[in-house]
């Protein structure tokens, strides 16, 4: 049964406290979102889990049975997270690598040597398989990391984060057996000679067959083996013309020559891939560089998984607290607190800027959305229905939280995030996860640093700003006033800025066209009162758009 872990998490907090409101506070989501999640879980399981009353709720027999299984599972997850965060080293496990024999011998060996010297206590396990077989090992979670040739038909191109090397494939032959050394040979003629190559289970074989097929030629190799070294040896004794990666020839062999082809053979790449594909990215983490008396600056590092990001961010926050404590000793309490708040605000905005820069933004997106939101909440606060909610403190809180609304994009691959064409259904599902990721990142990294009220607003903005008034949004399909007010406000300013900004897949729309689209979406995408207030103050919005144009920092 495919049920989202978040639903069980909500169930656990409600069942533990027997209160929807208490669970809402602990999870930093609205009470309506808690209720909606429980209804969804009950619908998927086909039976009620709680008996509702005005003050407290009670578990049904089915709910009590479920809690017996969910509670130990949640405790196990919590302990596992704590152990990972507290470990701070690589000494708890082993590194399991998958790679072909050729890649291990000619590419990976020097890196393994360096790694072993730096981390002698970390066991390294290597499994040899073809490049296509290595992808299967990774998907089966039998290895942690693979190095593979690319293109690779088993590897999804949208998951490729980086390349670690490029190489060319070459034909080699014995000059005493084949009189081709001083000629440029077309593929059509080359196919008449005895060709030798890796077997059809290899990416090299798939690659050459594909090239011949593009030229409407049939490739019929005479010899197919599983070893490039053996192919080189057979070429030396004149059994045929071998097709191999050029890095297998460390030095130009005197008894062999390169066959120059008329058609160009494209280069291939060596690429890494690792486990937990949906969480892979190169997230940015900031932490303070300091001594006992002074903060010298902030260091930006790149991590390999979300767990590592949380660990480094946690260390960063602890360091910031330490620095703040020393600052308080030097200055008066009032001045130091004000300065600390300014530092935290700048770090939050800088961190959001770096996340947005991965999406080909200039960072002006963060400034514009914050200013649009400031205008909107100012005028909404003048309306009787919002006056008690949108206090000056709440307005400041929302403006401060706004830059983090897209923080979850840190976990989205650059390939998907910056794709110039239309996204596939699978790619769009990946994009949609940034709301859940954003809520999780804010909860894990800012808890105990920011106030609960700020944390709640920031998390709700990140989690629900893609919900729609008619219930067709994501991630929970909330509708109407089930969507927290701060998220309904964020939705309007975020969409307006997206419409008026240039993206990889579109040009910027004129302001008037964007206003018209917002007006047409009132009551479907947006809260009618909120979007109506935004449209009533177009001139102030235009001034912000002009002041913070992309390319003018």
Image (tube, rainbow, N blue to C red):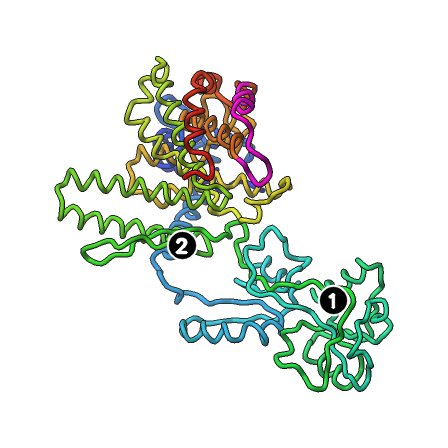
Work out which quarter of the rendered image holds the N terminus and state it: top right
- Of 523 and 192, nearer the camera is 192
Q: Secondary structure at mark 1?
A: helix
- Residue 83, disc: none
Residue 388: horizontal and vertical position, in percent? 31, 18
- Of 266 and 3, nearer the camera is 266
Of all residues, the one furthest to the top in this rendering is 384
Q: Which residue is mark 2?
A: 80
Would you identify the image quadrant in which residue 418 lies?
top right
Would you identify the image quadrant in which residue 291 lies?
bottom left
Q: Residue at x 69, y 64 (%)?
A: 203
Residues in magenta, as a range: 502-519
Where 36 falls versus 150 (above or below)?
above
Q: Residues within 10 Å of mark 2 (few under 14, many from 20)?
A: few
Q: Residues within 10 Å of mark 1 (few under 14, many from 20)?
A: some
Q: Is residue 261 magenta?
A: no
- Residue 205, disc: 1
Work out which quarter of the rendered image holds the C terminus and state it: top left
In front of the other: label 1 or label 2?
A: 1
Where 268 falls versus 341 (above or below)?
below
């Amino acid at each position: 049964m495919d049920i989202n872990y978040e639903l069980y998490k909500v169930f656990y907090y409600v069942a533990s406290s027997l209160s929807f409101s208490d669970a809402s506070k602990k999870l930093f989501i609205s009470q309506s979102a808690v209720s909606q999640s429980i209804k969804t879980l009950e619908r998927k399981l086909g039976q009620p889990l709680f008996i509702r009353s005005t003050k407290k709720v009670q578990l049904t027999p089915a709910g009590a049975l479920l809690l017996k299984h969910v509670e130990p599972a949640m405790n196990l997850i919590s302990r596992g997270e704590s152990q990972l965060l507290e470990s701070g080293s690589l000494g708890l496990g082993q590194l399991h690598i998958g790679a072909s024999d050729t890649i291990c011998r000619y590419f990976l060996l020097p890196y393994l040597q360096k790694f072993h010297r730096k981390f002698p206590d970390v066991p390294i396990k290597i499994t040899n398989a073809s490049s296509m077989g290595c992808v299967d090992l990774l998907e089966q979670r039998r290895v942690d990391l693979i190095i593979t040739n690319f293109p690779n038909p088993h590897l999804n191109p949208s998951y490729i984060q980086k390349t670690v090397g490029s190489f060319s494939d070459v034909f080699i032959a014995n000059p005493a057996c084949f009189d081709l050394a001083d000629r440029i040979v077309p593929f059509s003629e080359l196919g008449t000679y005895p060709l030798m190559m890796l077997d059809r289970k290899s990416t090299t074989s798939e690659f050459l067959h594909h090239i011949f097929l593009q030229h409407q030629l049939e490739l019929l190799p005479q010899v197919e083996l599983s070893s490039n070294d053996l192919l080189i040896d057979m070429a030396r004794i004149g059994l045929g013309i071998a097709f191999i990666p050029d890095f297998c020839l460390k030095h130009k062999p005197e008894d062999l020559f390169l066959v120059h082809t008329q058609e160009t053979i494209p280069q291939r790449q060596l690429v890494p891939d690792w486990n937990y594909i949906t969480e892979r990215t190169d997230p940015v983490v900031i932490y303070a560089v300091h001594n006992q008396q002074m903060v010298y600056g902030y260091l930006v590092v790149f991590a390999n998984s979300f767990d590592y990001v949380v660990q480094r961010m946690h260390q960063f926050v602890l360091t910031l607290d330490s620095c703040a404590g020393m600052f308080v000793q030097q200055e008066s309490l009032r001045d130091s607190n004000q300065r600390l708040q300014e530092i935290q605000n700048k770090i939050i905005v800088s961190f959001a800027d770096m996340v947005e820069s991965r999406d080909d933004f200039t960072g002006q997106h963060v400034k514009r959305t914050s200013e649009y939101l400031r205008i909107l909440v100012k005028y909404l606060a003048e309306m009787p229905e919002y006056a008690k909610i949108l206090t000056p403190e709440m307005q400041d809180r929302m403006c401060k939280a706004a830059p983090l609304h897209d923080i979850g994009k840190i976990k989205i691959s650059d390939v998907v995030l910056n794709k110039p064409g239309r996204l596939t259904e699978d790619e769009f599902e990946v994009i949609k996860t940034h709301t859940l990721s954003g809520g999780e990142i804010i909860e894990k990294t800012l808890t105990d640093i920011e106030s609960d009220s700020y944390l709640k607003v920031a998390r709700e903005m990140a989690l629900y700003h893609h919900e729609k008034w008619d219930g067709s949004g994501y991630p929970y399909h909330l509708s109407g006033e089930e969507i927290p007010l701060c998220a309904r406000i964020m939705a309007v300013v975020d969409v307006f800025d997206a419409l008026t900004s240039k993206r990889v897949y579109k040009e910027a729309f004129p302001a008037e066209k964007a206003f018209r689209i917002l007006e047409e979406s009132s009551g479907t995408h947006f809260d009618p009162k909120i979007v109506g207030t935004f449209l009533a103050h177009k001139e102030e919005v235009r001034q912000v758009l002009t002041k913070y144009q992309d390319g003018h920092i």
